[in-house]
Image (cartoon, helix red, strand yellow):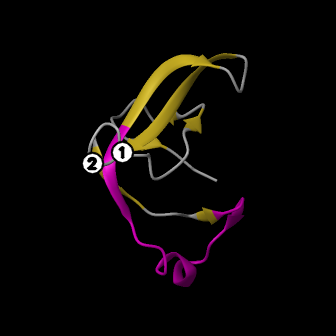
Amino acid sequence: MHVLVTPMRLMGFALDPKERRHYPAIRGNVMVNSTVCNELGRAANVARVEVGMPLDPDPLPPLLDATGRDGCDRVCVEWY
């Protein structure tokens, strides 16, 4: 699903709307996969944003334990 991702937090602290406007939105494809997560030591839903070519680096680190919201195709994601 192609989306625009706008940072809402910086190092765990919420950004106010004025601060959020200073960060450019990241356009990409959000991929959510269930996989064995080494960091958590268990299976987890991991979300990541893909932009450009497959070998290009991801613009954001993977989001661990991503969950769907209300059973819709929207994904509730929050990167720190």
From this viewpoint, is residue 28 visible? yes
Type of amino acid at the residue the image marks with label 1: Asp
The kind of secondary structure element at disc 1 is loop
The kind of secondary structure element at disc 2 is loop
Question: Which residue has dot 2 on it?
Answer: 52
Span colored in magenta: 10-30
Residue 28, image x, y percentages: 31, 50
Type of amino acid at the residue the image marks with label 2: Gly
Of labels 1 and 2, the one closer to you: 1
Say whether residue 17 is magenta: yes
Using the image, determine if residue 47 lies above or below residue 58.
Answer: above
Q: Quadrant of residue 65?
A: top right
Marks 1/2: CA distance?
7 Å
Residue 66, image x, y percentages: 54, 34
Quadrant containing the N terminus is top left
Marking on residue 56: 1
Using the image, determine if residue 29 lies above or below residue 40.
Answer: below
Mark 2, Cα crowd under 10 Å, few <14 / some 14-19 / many 20+, is few
7 and 61: which one is in front? 61
Q: Are marks 1 and 2 in contact (CB under 8 Å)?
A: yes
Q: Quadrant of residue 10?
A: bottom right
Left or right of 72? Residue 16 is: right
Using the image, determine if residue 41 lies above or below residue 8.
Answer: above
Left or right of 2? Residue 74 is: right
